Amino acid sequence: MALLCNLAKPHRLQKQIFMSVRICAAKNQTRRNWSTETEYKANSWKWSATAAGALLGLGSYLIFDTRRRKAALAESKNEPVPSHSFPQYTREDVKKHTNPSDRIWVTYAGEVFDITDFVDLHPGGKRILLAAGGALEPFWALYAVHKSEHVLEMLQEYKVGVLSHDDKEPPRDFSDPYSGDPSRHPVLKINSQKPFNAEPPPEMLTENFITPNELFFKRNHLPVPSINPDEFQLVVERPPGAKQGKPLTLSLKDLKTKFSRHEVTVTLQCAGNRRSEMNAVKPVKGLNWGSAAISTACWGGVWLRDVLLDAGYAEDLPNVRHVQFEGLDQDITGTKYGASISFRRAMSKDCEVLLAYEMNGEELPKDHGFPLRVIVPGVVGARNVKWLGRIIVSEEESSSHWQQNDYKGFNPSVDWDTVDFSTSPAIQDLPVQSAITEPHPGETIQLDHDDKITIKGYAWSGGGREIVRVDVSLDGGKTWRVAELIGEEHKEQTWAWKLWKLEAAIPLEQKELTIICKAVDSSYNVQPDTVAPIWNLRGVLNNAWHHISVTIDRDEH
């Protein structure tokens, strides 16, 4: 488990890669350094912030191209253009350059670069376009293997300007309750700005078993609260009749020093993941999530069970059925986000419910509940309350809107005129799920005569049920193949997803491909084949087979 939490820093390998490519380019500028690329790909799963081919790599091709351009520059005896001679641009100017017809620009450290001529050479394909019209810094923070002296030096060959000194961020509007929200990674697909809800591109989601914090999907219901960690107090209400009359209050320091620290690797999924496919059947109410409202992290903190025991609770306490969580996020009326889980789950050693103050070895980011949140493994994301401020043990569920009048499933024939939320239980464990992350829907895939297609995705099931198989069809469901699974070995409870991959040859005459995936968990639960029978007015719990269609374009030579 601890191994999954490590964020490797492959500085030595990085240097070897770039030095090897430099030597190769010097000897033969028309050859690709395949051994270096193979070495890079072989290590891609080990690097928590590195992808095969590199998202914004400016790697081997950039090195080759830079040497060529430097040689031409020296040959023509032109001197480099002084920095003060470059034109100035605003960020709005740069945003206009996002495609080859307008030229593709990016910025780094206050400078502007035109990388249009490099796009077709990029080892990572079109992913480099994710940064088009914006800054490189957020991407290099994820793919640090390319943030080196070599690449920074070579990037200068593409420089076309500098950012204007007068181009400043607009002042904060303190009348806006969302003005204190943190900055987010520009690659995220935004489904709602206020409150902020966003998901990463699916292909980036499955580059690593552990999702980088910046790419972890964001699901907020209210403005992100600003909390001083030194003043933070968790309030835990005591059992009725307890000797101590006052609630148990715990500072962040108390939690870290009074209780043992534990780690658990958990996948969280929004109930609305893949809602867009339900919208395609019939409109629903809710954010139009794609297939990436799901992510995995290694969480660090203390067991909820230990805190409840310290507050005076026991497993056999009568008239106790629920544990309510109240967040510190609130709307303008003072209404706070809240949810609850069963007391049995909260007190179970096997269920490993955590009060987390760390995420992937770092303090919780603001968007993910700083300074404290609940992690309930195997349960819908809505019960994993962020910015936790209060815990109440009760005979009743939380009275929160999000527990009583949201995050519930209904018959496909129930509409907004007939719905009665009191007739349906709140979602807790989630059903078995899988999705394809590569290739993209509608993508045209270039294949040589004997190339194989590579298909990737994720699979997960709630309640601690392990994924035991992922089936993939390349002919619309007529025949099936078994994908390779990547993830933790079997144990009694499996809280994290499995990533999967399939490589397959495609008949030469086949031009159109319908790819489907479906997962099977350890209880032999299988995904339903279509969306329509599980459609519901809130668009939750979509776990139908995931379909995509792609076109095959073969090299005729």
Image (tube, helix red, strand yellow):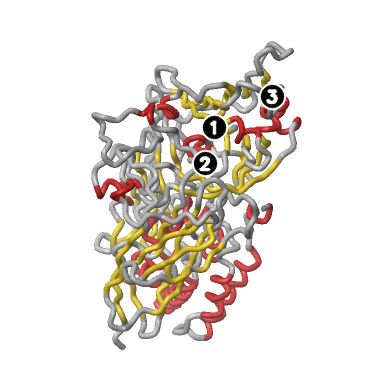
- Do the numbered discs 3 and 1 sit on residues whose CB atoms are within 8 Å? no
User: Marks 3/2: CA distance?
Assistant: 23 Å
Residue drawn at the location 40% of the way across and 40% of the way down = 197
> For mark 2, does the 10 Å Cα neighbourhood hold few (<14), some (14 to 19), or many (20 or more) residues?
many
Task: Find numbered disc 3 in the image and state the secondary structure of the residue it sits on.
Answer: loop
Which residue lies under the disc numbered 1? 341
Q: Residue at x 42, y 74 (%)?
A: 69
Tell me if residue 463 comes above or below residue 341 in the rendering.
Answer: below
Q: Is residue 85 visible?
A: no
Neighbour tally class for label 1: few under 14, some 14-19, many 20 plus, Cα within 10 Å: many
Is residue 532 toward the left or the right of residue 149 in the image? left
Question: Mark 3 = which residue?
Answer: 313
Give the residue at mark 2: 379
Task: Identify the secondary structure beneath mark 2.
Answer: loop
Residue 170 location (% of width, % of height): 37, 34
Residue occupying the point 57% across, 57% down: 48
Closer-to-camera residue (356/303): 303
Judging depth in this view, the residue of 230 and 395 nearest the camera is 395
Q: How many marks?
A: 3
Residue kind at label 2, given as amino acid type: Val
Q: Earlier in the sequence, mark 3 or mark 1?
A: 3
Spatial separation of the CA atoms under disc 2 and disc 1: 9 Å
